[in-house]
Amino acid sequence: MGDKGVAQYFNFLSRKLGIAGVTYTEELTSQLINTVEALVYILSEDNKIVVFNPACERLSGYKKQEVLGKRYEMLVPAEEVERVAQGVSVVFSDNRTWQDEIEWFTKDGKRRLIAWSKTRFTEKNGFARYLLATGLDVTEERLREKRRSLSLEIFATIGSTINHDGVLEQILELLRDYFQCDAAGIRLRKGGDYPYIKTSGFPAGFVSEDTMLCSPRPNGQSSITEESAALECICGRVICGDLDLYLSSIAGQGGFFTGNINELTSLLAKNKFPFTIRNYCGQSGFSSIVWLPLRFRGETVGLLQLNDRAPDKFTSEEVEFLSIVAQNIGGALVRFNSEQRSKGESVLVTLLEKSREGFFVSSHEGSISFYSKAMEQICGYTKDQVAEHGWFYLVFPYEEERRQAVQKARLVMAGKLEFVEFEITRKDGEKNWVRFSVTPLEIARKQYTLTTLSEMAKSAPIKTGSLPILN
C-alpha cells in the first residue's frame, strides 16, 4: 500500500470532521507520517505491517525494513497478543475506533507502554482495507502516576490510626504489589542488632534463620555492643553505611541491589572482606534483592528489603525511587518512636507527680532534669534551690551530719545498701525522718540517678537497708 491510499483516507476524514481548506496529497501525507512525533503504523487485513513511520523506528529500535511484511505480534508481549487480536478484529469487522494502552517490545528487550488509537479505512477501489494505528508513548507518565499513587498510599498508611505493626504490614503489602516481588521485610534496631520486625512472602524458616545480624558467640550471646556493632552480611553493611568501601554498585542513600545474589556471593568470596556473607537469600531461591537503610536526619532505625526469585527484577530507576520511599518510612518510624518515648515519659512523669514519695533525676554533672512536687513538699526546697546549692547542703545544714549522711548515701549508690533512713532539716527548720534510695538510669546512652525520698514517722529510729555491706 502507498501513501495514496492514506491520503484518500485523510481527505475523507477531513470532510467528515468539517475541516476545510486542506487537501492531503500523497507528498503531504508522506511528510506528515514521516515527521510527526506520534507513532504511526498501518496493518493490512492479514495483520501484516505495511507502513512503519520514523517515530516507530526510534521507539522500537527496528528499522522499517525489518518489520514491513511482518505480523504485528512481533512487537507485542505474549500476554497481550490475544487482547490486541480482539481489538484488531473489532476495527476490521465493525469499523469502530479502538483505543487502548498496550505494551510494545523494543528490539533491546525493553517494554514501552503505548496509548493507541486504531481505526479502519478502505482504499478508493472499495476492496483493500487497512488498519491505521496512531500512538503515544505514555510509559514515563504512567510510571509517575503509579509512583505518586504508591507514595500517597504509603503516606496515608503512615498517618493512619492503625497500630505500629499494622502500618509496617500494610507498607510491605503495598510495596510487594507495586513491584510485583515475591517477598519484602523490614528490620528495626533493637539493642545492638536489627532483627526482622515484619516480613511478607518469605518461606517458612527463613526469618528465624536470618533474623539476627550480629555474629553469635559460642554461648549463643551476641558478640557486639550497641557502641560497636559487628553486623554481618550485606544487610549489616548497608545499615552501617560502609558498603561503598567494598562494593561500587550503590543504589543511592547508602543502599544496594543485585540481580543475581549467587553470582555476587561468588565474587565476594574471592575477596577477603571483614564481614561474612551468609547468602540465606540465595539458598532460599531468591536472585534479585534490594537493601535500603531506613534513615531520618542521620539516624538509622532499620532496613527495608525486597526479594524476588527472578534475576534482574529491579532497575536502578525503580531502586532510586524506592530509596525516597525508604526515607519517608524511616522518618515515620523515627517520629513514631519519638512519640512512643514521649508518651512513656508523659505517663512516667504523671505517675511520679501523683506519688506521695519525692523524686528527682540528676545527671552525673549535677544538673536536675526532673524534680517532683512531693520532693519539694517533703524537704521544702524548690528545684532551682537544690540545683544551685545541692540537696545535701540544704537538708543537712551542719557539716558533721552532712558528712555522715553523704557516707551512708554513697553506700546506697554503690549498691551495698538498698536504702538508708536519716533525719533531714526542712527549709522551715522542722526536722523530718525520710527513707533515702537511689536508682541508676541510662537514658539515650547518658547516665542519670533517680533519687527517691519517703517520709517516715517523726520518731522513727535510724535504720539501714537489708542488704549486707560489701567489703
Image (cartoon, rainbow, N blue to C red):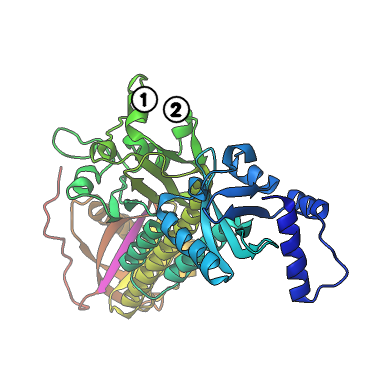
Quick one: SS at disc 1? Answer: helix
339 displayed left or right of 211: right
Residue 262: horizontal and vertical position, in percent?
A: 32, 31
Q: Marks 2 and 1, how far apart in space?
A: 9 Å
Query: Amino acid under label 2?
Result: Tyr
Q: Which residue shows up at 64% across the image and 43% down it? A: 57
The residue where tag 1 is placed is 268
Q: Which residue shows up at 31% across the image and 43% down it? A: 309
First in sequence: mark 2 vs mark 1: 2
Residue 242: horizontal and vertical position, in percent?
A: 45, 34
Residue 132: horizontal and vertical position, in percent?
A: 63, 59
Q: Is residue 355 magenta?
A: no
* Stretch of the chain drawn in magenta: 447-454
Residue 192 shows up from this direction = yes
Q: Which of marks 2 and 1 is in front?
A: 1
The dominant secondary structure in magenta is: strand
231 or 311, nearer to the observer: 311
The residue where tag 2 is placed is 246
107 or 20, nearer to the observer: 20
Q: Is residue 452 magenta?
A: yes
